[in-house]
Amino acid sequence: MKVTIFGSGYVGLVTGACLAHVGHQVTCVDIDAERVERLNRGESPIYEPGLDTYLASGLSEQLLSFTTDAENAVADADVIFIAVGTPTCEDGSADTRFVLNVAKTIGKYLRRPSLIVTKSTVPVGTADKIYEAVAETLAYRDLSIKFHVASNPEFLKEGAAVNDFMKPDRIIVGVDAPEVVDLFRQLYAAFNRNHDRLMVMDVRSAELAKYAANAMLATKISFINEMANIAERVGADIEAVRKGIGADPRIGYHFIYPGCGYGGSCFPKDVRALESTAKQFGYEPQILPAVESVNSRQKHSLFSKLAGRLGSDLRGQTIAVWGLAFKPQTDDMREAPSIPLIKSLLVAGARVLAFDPKASDACAEIFAEYEGIDFVDTKEAAVTEADALVICTEWKSFWSPDFAQLRRLMRGRLVVDGRNLYDTALMAREGFDYISIGRPTMAGETPLMAVDTDEELSVLADAV
Ligand code: UDX
């Protein structure tokens, strides 16, 4: 099939590369000429395991191409995907401006019946708005061309995006007419071989399913983080609790790992956007704001734990940070818990030595205006002469450090671990003052929460 995809960001690029991989003729349209040029040379703007290989084979087999020329890309397509960004507006709602601009472009160049599909996460009702925008533009051209608008949300995880796309749990398609289903069956035949993964529903349910999935996952994380905060205070071990509840298949082991808060391009944005949609439709959600507020508090917990030991004035202290990306296997810094941590450290006067296997450049951009932070090339360089080490991301290379070397390199013995990587008793034997999430320290005390909120952080900034 001839497939055109608007937007060569995370979702668009992975969708394009994977659809070309199974033999479709894919044209990706993007307004960023430099990005298009780089992609046509096989250079991916994002780090994603397996993507480079698919990109290279798609280009060399001439099944995949990138262009800024929307006109030809639209005129020829059987299926047109919209995979442009939906950033958050100030009020928390999703900004669909880019999506609707693409809809107008499609209306401007459409020449034959086509299927338009939203792949971006868009608020409920957006497909209807796309329909109106395309129809209006066609009417302006005095044309009557039959088209459908469907919703086919993407559930891929960063760091595993290619694999997720190639082996989906489910393919949700929200359609406005039964004949559209056959087009989807053709499009996804290669992904749907052994058992039928296609779930057909109405468009609004498909749009809401995407938000509901992310909100549910975010809720699981905030729930376990709340339990971790309770565990710390009552002297329980959240890791034992996690296993205890995960064994119940109704709860399950997935997505109940406590930590320093969820980040990324989806959970924070989608929870806020769903809350905003609910309000627009006259419903005041109760769970969604709580999920978000537990999460933002959790992001401050690393600094609180550290300040509970070293005090809030960190002038003259060097703090090592291992892991900057919002999760391993990505260079993505969006909403990463390392950002509020580092801000607090710098406000408190610390010198920060930061290391991440992939995300240092992206993080350096965020802190370009700040003084007191250096990005180093190895995890050893980060801890050299450090008074404390804070771990934000569970990269594999952090799981089994040489503790004797760590002791030699570090000046202090404090390790604050936002991902519960190490055994508490082992850390005590190795001579570290080890504070993790929801687990008792060897001294058995609850680390003091020095700073819980942004407001308290600004009070701290004034005090230092
Ligand atoms: C997520 C969804 O998983 C995916 O289906 C959707 O399409 C996009 O959003 P992604 O943002 O790539 O994917 O990351 P994910 O692996 O889900 O992790 C999100 C955040 O939650 C990370 O910051 C991670 O560290 C955190 N997390 C995850 C936890 O703190 N605990 C967990 O148990 C799981």
Image: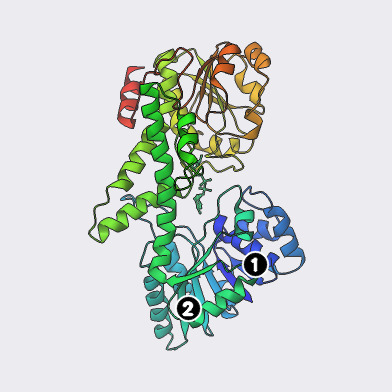
Q: How many residues crowd around disc 2 within 10 Å: few (fewer than 14), some, or many (20 or more)?
A: many
**Res 41 visible:** no
Residue at left 49%, top 14%? 442
Q: Which residue is mark 1?
A: 194
Q: Which residue is mark 2?
A: 108
Label 1 crowd (10 A; few <14 / some 14-19 / many >=20): few
Q: Is mark 1 within 8 Å of ligand 1?
A: no
Residue 58 occupies quadrant: bottom right
Name the residue rendered at 39%, 33% in the picture.
227
Quarter of image, res 453: top left
Mark linked to residue 388: none
- The quarter of the rendered structure image containing the N terminus is bottom right
> Of marks 1 and 2, which one's residue comes earlier in the chain?
2
Q: Nearest the camera: 30 or 409?
A: 409
CA separation, marks 1 and 2? 40 Å
Q: Amino acid at mark 2?
A: Lys
Among the 4 quarters of the image, the one containing residue 57:
bottom right
Q: Secondary structure at mark 2?
A: helix
Quarter of the picture containing the C terminus is top left
Can you give x and y, in whole percent of width and height, for residue 313 in the image? 40, 15
